Image (tube, rainbow, N blue to C red):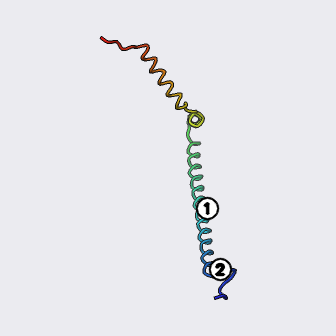
Amino acid sequence: MTDRMTDGTADGTERNAGQRRAGLDEQALLLAAGLADLAVSTVGTALGTVRGLLRRSDGAELAEQAEQDLMARGRLALDRYTAVPPAHLEILARNARSTRNATTHHPVRDV
């Protein structure tokens, strides 16, 4: 049994480790190939779209609308990520103040 041992590990263990490594290498290769194929098809589709847009007679108007749309999207994105919502206690204080003001200005009269 000692003649089958190398570096303190059995040959079967080394073989299993090699198979796992080969499996991971194959997975990485397949993922890279899939990503490359997706990129090529996306670029091809984008180029076809750009060619179609360049043939249009209303290209200037289309570009202006696209610019306005992008600016609106940018404004919305900035508002979404930079606006800080009011603090919870601040909201409660405002509600209490408005309730108090409503009851002092409009008292309920017994008839």
Q: CA distance from mark 1 to mark 2?
A: 33 Å
The dot on residue 87 is none
Residue located 40% across and 14% down the image: 106
Q: Residue furthest front?
A: 110
Left or right side of 105 for 68: right
In this rendering, the count of numbered labels is: 2
Label 1 vs 2, first from the N-terminus: 2
Q: Amino acid at mark 1?
A: Ala
Q: Residue furthest top?
A: 111
The residue beneath circle 1 is 32
The residue beneath circle 2 is 9
**Residue 78: x %, y % from top left:** 59, 35
Left or right side of 110 for 12: right
3 above or below 65?
Answer: below
Residue 67 appears in view: no
Q: 62 or 14, which is in the foreground?
A: 14
41 above or below 69?
Answer: below
Q: 102 or 50, which is in the foreground?
A: 102
**Residue 11: x %, y % from top left:** 63, 82
Residue located 60% across and 55% down the image: 39
**Residue 10: x %, y % from top left:** 63, 81
Element carrying mark 1: helix
Q: Residues within 10 Å of mark 1 (few under 14, many from 20)?
A: few
2 above or below 109?
Answer: below
Q: Quadrant of residue 25?
A: bottom right
Residue 24 appears in view: yes
